[in-house]
Image (cartoon, rainbow, N blue to C red):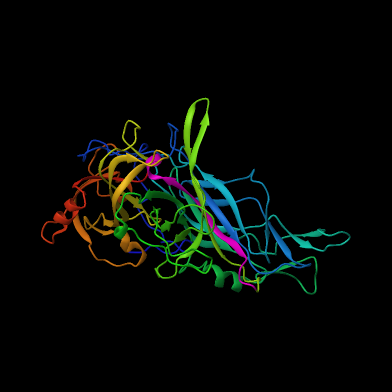
Amino acid sequence: MYAAAAIAAVGCGGSGNGTHAGGGGGGTGPKSNVGIKVKLTGLNTAPPGAIEVAYLTGQGRAVGDLTAVVQRLIFQDSYGEVTNPLAPLTNCVLSGYQNNVVHMDVPFSTQAVGAPSRLFTSFNLDFLQFNEETDSPVQGSYVVLPEPAGFPKTYPASLRVFPGRTTSLPVFVDDSMFTVDATNPQQVDYNEAQFLQANGATSATPIQGFLSDMVSFNLNKLPANAIPALVPTPTGVAAVPAVRVFFSGDVYAVSAASGAGPNFEVLATDPTQPIGGNLGAAGVLNGPGGTLPHAGTYSLVQLNPTDITLTAKVVALQGIWREHSTVLTQPNGKPLGAGSFAITLPSSSDNNMQEFVAFTQDGTTTAAGVPNITNLYYGFVDMDAMTFNLYPVIDIMTGATAGGLTGTISKLYTAQGAATTAPDLVRSGVYAYNTGDGSAAAAAAAGLSNGTFYVFRL
């Protein structure tokens, strides 16, 4: 029921073929009280996906430390090569705990026209150079060393990219893996065993990417006894009621009210050990052409192991989130009003198993104009078995199954309204709660209705 933690998401799969369904509506299939349009871009053509490689470094810093300089990323799949030749230099201090992100867009309008997603199965470990700090003749001085012999190195990875969405790939590099040769100070030695131990990076355990852009659902109008509470973390997140819940297809998260101090946590396979962090606000950009909602950010933090007071923190990973009302609209672009709605979110496997979110709105909005959610259930759908399971959102912190609902899927549709059995082509489907186990009655009592779900993808 739980996705893996933010730095170890689910693996590869999916058919990777078929006609691209730009627009993310439900086609001509049956609809519930209102259709849902997935709005991830203002472009009329297929938008790029994004890869963000996070080079996570780690220990203390002193003269003689190495800084690995990263510039170019290269990924290859069956549709062609993607790279970022004009990317700025990124300095990764191997002995300092840092999160160094290198961004690259992945096109779907040239090399992969019509592809529902792109799967990259290898990662190119490559450095422009290494800078060795000397502090001579002045503080901050360094000498430039070439990358080790035999580089670049290629390692197995599992990195799925969707149009309009962001996939993160954490790569751990530190000064146990790269050192200046004791007999040749002009040479950097590479300890591959250390890299493999930290990253997996084998055919059995490839480096895992995960969908890091999340959709936020507010819990403003839920009864107090239906709202989950955050779990205290070593980095300062307090046990207070959640005000938002987040889904990406790979990861669940919750947040408390914004303000001073850590207020965000990603849920791991052990729900008692979430990864704490901070949530940055989303908002609206105003311009001559009108207003445009922009994404918020989140950052996961950990205690800095070099701080003996165990109070200093370092960023371990980061990503973006968007209000559900900015990415889920009526087909005409207007906000969803009062009613019962359901969406599914594909994972990095892009297979038959997807996250499932069913929610109700009462037609009111927050002070910021975001529709208020009055009830929310989460779970998963199996598009092969044509069944689904949903649980009250309060269960998300414990993994409990109390109050669970079951149901069946009767139809699956592409964006053009054609029937399909290929999970990566599905953009909508018809669902109904089971009557035999009481799910239909419980769903009705919660305001949830049978109807059409829509897939969170373009």
Residue sitting at the far right: 137
Q: For the magenta stretch, what is the residue range?
A: 309-327
From the viewer's perspective, is 110 left or right of 219? Answer: right
Inspect the magenta stretch and tell me whether residue 278 lies in it: no
Query: Could you say where residue 284 lies in the image, as x and y percent from the top left?
Result: 49, 37
Q: Is residue 110 visible?
A: no
- Considering every residue shown, the one lying at the far top of the view is 288
Residue in front for this viewpoint, 440 or 213: 440
- List x then y, in percent, for residue 151: 65, 61
User: Where's residue 67, x and y in %?
Assistant: 71, 61
Residue at 82% x, 58% y is: 141
| Residue placed most toward the observer, 305 or 158 | 305
Q: Would residue 309 appear left or right of 296 to someone viewing this image? A: right
Q: Is residue 139 left or right of residue 196?
A: right
Question: Residue 382 appears in which quarter of the rendering?
Answer: bottom left
| Number of numbered discs visible in the structure rendering | 0
Residue 304 visible: yes
Let me know if residue 314 is in the magenta part.
Answer: yes
